[in-house]
Amino acid sequence: MDAALAGAVTLVVAVAITADIGGTRAPDVGAYLFAVGLGLLMFIRRRHPVLALVATGVGITGYYIADYPPIGLALPMAAALYSAAERGRLLVAASTAAVLLGGSLIFRIGEGQGSNYLLGYELPWSAAIMAGAIALGDGVRSRQQQAARQREREQELRRATELEAARRVEAERLALARDLHDVLAHTTTVIGMQAHVAREALDDGDIDAARAALEVISEASGEASRELRTTVALLRQPADRAPRAPTGSLARLDRLAAATTEAGLPVTVHVTGTPGPLPSTVDVTAYRIVQEALTN
C-alpha cells in the first residue's frame, strides 16, 4: 500500500510538472526530485503521519517558491491528508488543508490572478478533493477500529466459552469423583463387615450364616460393579453431550437399607407424606448423604 501511494503521488506530480502549464521556470531535474521526494514521504506515513503531512506541505511550498510549473495543491496533498486522517490525526489534516488553501488563495490573488476563477472554480474543487481524502482516511480508520472491536469481542466470547467449558468439565470431574468415592466406600464397608461375619461363622461351623454373608458380599459387589460401569460409561461420552443422569436416587433407599441391614446393622426407612419428584441434584445429594452416613 505504501509503495502504491508513493508511486501514485510521484506519477501525478511528475505528469503535472511535465505538462508545464504556466510557471516562469522550465521543469528540470530539481522539479522531478520534488516529485520523488513527495512520493517517498508515503513510506513514513504510518509511523509519522503528522511529519509526512507537514513535510508534504513544506515541500509543495518550496516547489512553488522555486517558480516551477504549477502542480496544484489537492492532488499532491491528497495522499498525505488521507494518511494523516487514517492514523487518527483528523484535526491536523483539516488544519493543514485549510492553511494551505488559504495561503495559496491569498498569494495568488496578490499576484493578480482572477478571484472569480479562483473562488468559483479552483478553490471549490481543491477543497472538495482534500475533504474527500480526509473523509476517506477517517472512514478507513473507523472501519479498522470497528473490525478491531469486533475481533476483541469475539476473543472475549471465545475466552468466556473456554472458561465455561473448563468449569463444567471440572464440576463433572468432581461429581464423578464423589460418586466413585461414595460407591466404593459404602461397598467396601459392607463387604468388609460381611467378610468378618463369614469368617466368624466358619470358625463357629455355621455354614448357613457364612453362606448368607457371602451372598450379601456378592450382591454388594454386583451393585458396585453396575454403578462403576455407569460411571466409566459417562467418562467415555463426548464432552459436548448433555449433562449425565445421576447414579443415585432416594427411590433406591430401600435397597440401600436392605444391604446395610444384611451387613449386620439394622436400618429402617420411614416415609412421611407422599414422595414427589425432586430436582436431580437434590435427589442424588440426599441419597449420597444417607449412603455416607451408613458407611460411617
Image (cartoon, helix red, strand yellow):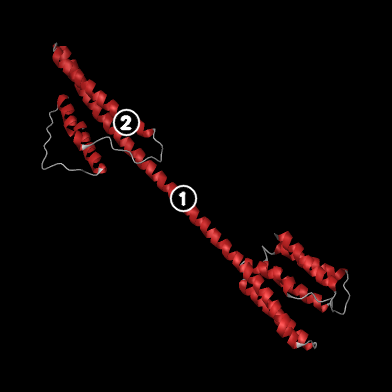
Q: Quadrant of the N terminus?
A: bottom right
Q: Which residue is mark 1?
A: 159
Viewer can see residue 15: yes
Determine the residue located farthest toward the top in the rendered image: 205
Q: Circle 2 — which element?
A: helix
Query: Vertically, is 216 above or below 176?
Result: above
| Quarter of the figure with residue 194 | top left
Query: Vertically, is 60 above or below 44?
Result: below
Earlier sequence position, callout 2 versus callout 1? 1
Q: Nearer the viewer, residue 7 or 161?
A: 7
Amino acid type shown at disc 1: Arg
Decide: few, some or many residues near mark 2? Use Cα within 10 Å; few <14, some 14-19, many ≥20. some
| Residue found at x 43% / y 49% | 161
Decide: few, some or many residues near mark 1? Use Cα within 10 Å; few <14, some 14-19, many ≥20. few
Q: Circle 1 — which element?
A: helix
Q: Is residue 78 left or right of residue 194?
A: right
Counting from the top left corner in percent of width and height, residue 76 is at: 75, 71
Q: Which residue is mark 2?
A: 230
Viewer can see residue 34: no
